Image (cartoon, grey):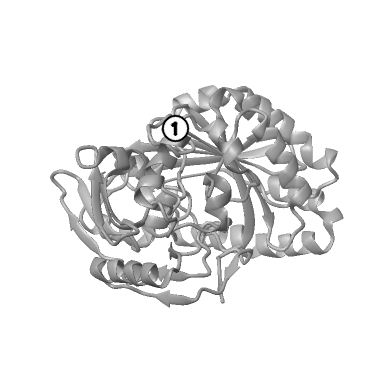
Amino acid sequence: MWRNWAGNQAMTPASVEHPASVDEVVQVVKDAGAAGRRVKAIGSGHSFTAIGLTDGVLVHLDRLDRLVDADPVTGRVTVQGGLPLHRLNALLAERGMGLTNMGDIDVQTVTGALSTGTHGTGRDSGALATQVVALELVLADGTVLACSADDNPDVFAVARVSLGALGIVTTVTMQAEPAFLLTADERPMPFDEVVADLERHVAENEHFELYWFPHTDLALTKRNNRTAGPARPLPRARKLLDDELLSNGVFAATCALGKAVPALVPGINRVAARALTARTYTDLAPRVFTSPRRVRFEEMEYAIPRPALPGVLRELRTLPERHGQRISFPVEVRVAPADDIALSTASGRDTAYVAVHVYRGTERAAYFDAVEALLGGVGGRPHWGKLHSLGAAELRGRYPRFDEFVGVRDRLDPERRFTNAYLDRVLGP
């Protein structure tokens, strides 16, 4: 039995493989084809959806985890798909290099993060997939296909966010840059004030995001901007207090209490919001972009057109009370510029991301359904690795290049070697 990080998805595959080379991946795929079995690759299991489940052959990429090459002159970095992002960040830092943008956690594998469209927040810099310049896929017939803007460009145009539907991504080349410092400015602000000035906050900062605590009128705002230094990291004691004791230890305890006695949640949130304090520090970018997340939760996130964000947030503010919900987890809001990847959630439009969460094991249906209806009403696109109820018919209308992706899939995997129930739902059989 395999379970994901959140514990809400499980599978019992027919077999589990841990290939250590591309040749071994090829053989696994060929053997599965001969046996008539489906194949799914899995990374760290940090998706909340069933995107990685299979009753066939499960391919763990944990032994394909090397840095193949890193050229500080060109900034090109080639890695195997099973390399976790936190190890990639460390390896790049040793070489004086870094990624332009990151999500807020770093436990995913490179392939898993790319396949689900993982992103951070950025005024000018997009999702992780926008940093990819080439990749290598093992296809259903065992062919190893290299693609880039010059080689097989039609595949490259869709494969950077592939949902695992085109093949197994074994090697990825990314455009990195010299390592840089970020100054983090984190401070609580009144919710109405933040929403009224959203465009200014986004325009004035390279990376802006906010966390709003339901049942309160406060939001925690985060601004990350490049600086020449010097580095002034958080003192170890402050980092342990804020990021481990309060954000994980105490938060886990209050979530458990709120789950047991939901009526206490609004009061707990108000106390937590009032306890927020400002902090400023300067550190290497990966240490600012990412934070430890040890409290288990379930999540839904939608990408909406940027102009719709203020109205959505004002509506969302009253939603928990209108539906009789008590929500302990904050709502997270981030932004990204438009990109040119077919099934990227920011494909073709400047985007805002609205993510809602519930503590693991908490009833979520009414809350998530209401949020999904609100965000769907403005043309929202669900994150591929986070919970949603949409199928191919709705998604085709929200992605102008949906059929372009499906056409490449039809060509590369006509027998649907890499499909599962989730992909049948969101892409069609």
- Identify the residue shown where x is 64% and y is 56%: 298
For the N terminus, the quadrant is bottom right
- Identify the residue shown where x is 84% and y is 61%: 261
- Identify the residue shown where x is 24% and y is 37%: 149
In this rendered view, identify the residue nearer to me: 279 or 24: 24
Residue on which disc 1 sits: 401
In this rendered view, identify the residue nearer to me: 225 or 39: 39
In this rendered view, identify the residue nearer to me: 119 or 167: 167
In the picture, residue 90 is in which quadrant? bottom left
Q: Is residue 420 above or below residue 371?
A: below
Q: Is residue 14 something one can see in this rendering?
A: yes
Farthest residue in the left direction?
Answer: 73
Residue 368 position in % (x across, y down): 71, 46
Q: Is residue 359 above or below residue 347?
A: below
In the picture, residue 375 is in which quadrant? top right
Residue 394 position in % (x across, y down): 61, 36
In the displayed structure image, the side of residue 214 where residue 243 appears, left or right: left
What count of labels does the image hold?
A: 1
In the displayed structure image, the side of residue 358 where residue 323 appears, left or right: right
- Identify the residue shown where x is 77% and y is 53%: 268
In this rendered view, identify the residue nearer to me: 87 or 139: 139
- Give neighbour class at mark 1: few <14, some 14-19, many 20+ (Cα, 10 Å): some
In the displayed structure image, the side of residue 383 where residue 169 appears, left or right: left
Q: Secondary structure at mark 1?
A: loop
Q: Is residue 119 above or below residue 203?
A: below
Residue 413 position in % (x across, y down): 38, 52
Residue 259 position in % (x across, y down): 78, 61
In the displayed structure image, the side of residue 263 where residue 413 appears, left or right: left
Q: For the residue marked with disc 1, what is the amino acid? A: Arg
